[in-house]
Amino acid sequence: MEALHLPRNWVLGTATYTQQSSMHDPIKYLNSPEWKEPAADPIVDALKAAGTAALQVSEGARTAARAVLNLVATYSTPEIGVEAQEITLEWYKDRNHVVVVSVDGASITWAGMVGPANPPVKGKLPFNNQLPQEALEAIRAAS
Amino acid sequence: MQPDIADLERLAVFVFDSGKMKADGVHWKAFRPDERGERSFFRIDGLDYAAIAAIGNEVAAERSQTLHGWAVLRADKARGVTPLQIRSDEPPPRHGVIVGWPSESQDERSAAQSLARIAGTVRYPN
């Protein structure tokens, strides 16, 4: 492909602008890492969608939600929401395979269904950057 | 109607959010209590599809929402979801509420998921 060459100097009104960087190939520049948009942050997106409700969510809850997302990165992407002081992460396959995990910065809760023949699972524990085994198995079932 | 709800009565929980009508049934969030700690239902024994839809559309109009369908619960099955209770709450006629929701969020979600699991589903195309 023929390289594109932009002028090094151009004039707008009475001002003359000089190109500071050597951008001989704009296509190459636009594909470079510094031009790419930052990766989407689903936690930030959920907080934005929640509007003023997100004001009740602590920084600790955000950190905990990111930790949970990192712990389950190999599973399907949950639907993230905000409820009161909690950030919720929901995996839904069907009504018999569903789980909601929530974090508020101090604790982690979960409530889910792990199959039509199995009883509901639920619980609450202090959050220490680990997923309770029962919650993890429910996520696996609903992914 | 009689204030006592019989075990075999059918109860309709109307759905006004299309996102809560899932392929396999009604999403559990449709059963969650409102800010008063109640989930409304209508007692539908003796009513056909058109009559039930008429009630649902009336409720939808009051809320400026759209009816997308309803979940159907049998009273005894709903009572079996501990610690929930059901009771008549007229007016309007046939109206009732599910009360006794747990205060802990995981317990409340679990109860709503349990209702979703035992509910039948009727779609109302728009």
Image: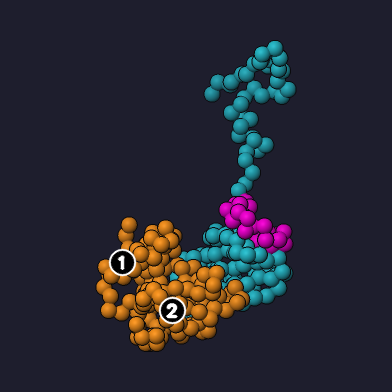
Going by the image, does A77 lie left or right of B12? right
Image marks 1 and 2: residues in contact by CB distance under 8 Å: no
Indicate the chain on which mark 1 is placed. B
Q: Residue at x 52, y 70 (%)?
A: B34
* Residue picked out by circle 2: B89
Image quadrant where residue B121 sits = bottom left
Front of the two marks 1 and 2? 2
Label disc, if present, on residue B54 of the rendered structure: 1
Q: Amino acid at mark 2?
A: Asp
Nearer to the camera, A66 or B27? B27
SS at badge 1 = helix
Instruction: Determine whether the residue tagged by mark 2 lies in a helix, strand or loop.
Output: loop
The image shows residue B29 at horizontal and vertical percentages of: 49, 68
Q: Which region shows up in magenta?
A: A41-67
- Residue B97 percent location from the top left of the image: 45, 77
Q: Chain A appears in which tint?
A: cyan
Disc number placed over residue A13 in the picture, else none: none
Magenta stretch containing residue A49, yes or no? yes
Please tell me how crowded label 2 is: few (under 14), some (14-19), or many (20+) other residues with Cα within 10 Å. some
**Residue B124 screen position, x and y as percent:** 32, 63
Mark 1 Cα shell of 10 Å, populated few (<14), some (14-19), many (≥20): few
Q: Main secondary structure of the magenta part?
A: helix
